[in-house]
Image (cartoon, rainbow, N blue to C red):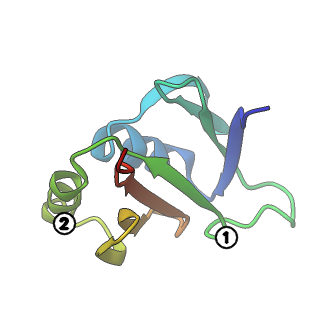
Amino acid sequence: MKLDSAVFYSNDIEKVVSFYKDILDFTVEYQQGDKYVAFIFPNNARLGIKLKNEEREIPGAQTVFVSLESGIENLYENLKQKNVSIHKELVIQDWGKNFSILDPDGNKVQFVEKQAKPQ
């Protein structure tokens, strides 16, 4: 079993498309006007972002974790230079490194680079 996709909710699809595509360099798989967009990752996992239209769909209440093989420090510095809202500064722990940002709706994107296990 593996996770296929996750969905965030947004108040403004065009604003989040610009953020995820132009700032984070995510690949758009599909877009339905100003109602929905899906980003696809190299492992075929998807992040969908849907325009809020029901009471239970709360922009800013979701979190997604994005795993990197390497280069988390460079990504962190690059996003800081682009004035992206840093939610949690880069932390180095014994299991790896991580930091998080907030998208235009306040949804959290947590970047994780796990340390290779000694053999």
Answer with left or right where residue 25 lies relative to residue 51. left
Q: Is residue 41 above or below residue 50?
A: above
Which mark, by number, is residue 32? none
Around disc 2, counting alpha carbons within 10 Å, would you say few (fewer than 14), some (14 to 19), or many (20 or more)? some
User: Helix, strand or loop at disc 1?
Assistant: loop
User: Helix, strand or loop at disc 2?
Assistant: helix
Q: Is residue 67 above or below residue 59?
A: above
Residue denoted by label 2: 80
Inter-mark Cα distance, 2 to 1: 22 Å
Q: Quadrant of residue 89?
A: bottom left
Residue 77 rendering spot, x and y as whole percentages: 15, 61
For this rendering, which residue is in front, 38 or 45? 45
Q: Report the residue at 25% width, 53% height from top.
A: 72
Residue denoted by label 1: 61
Q: Report the residue at 56% width, 53% height from top.
A: 12
Answer with left or right where residue 26 lies relative to residue 10. left
Sequence-earlier tag: 2 or 1:
1
Q: Amino acid at mark 2?
A: Lys
Residue 60 rendering spot, x and y as whole percentages: 61, 69
Q: Amino acid at mark 1?
A: Ala
Q: Report the residue at 56% width, 46% height from top.
A: 13
Q: Quadrant of residue 2?
A: top right
Residue 97 rendering spot, x and y as whole percentages: 33, 64
Image quadrant holding the N terminus, namely top right
For this rendering, which residue is in front, 24 or 104? 24
Answer with left or right where residue 1 lies relative to residue 60. right
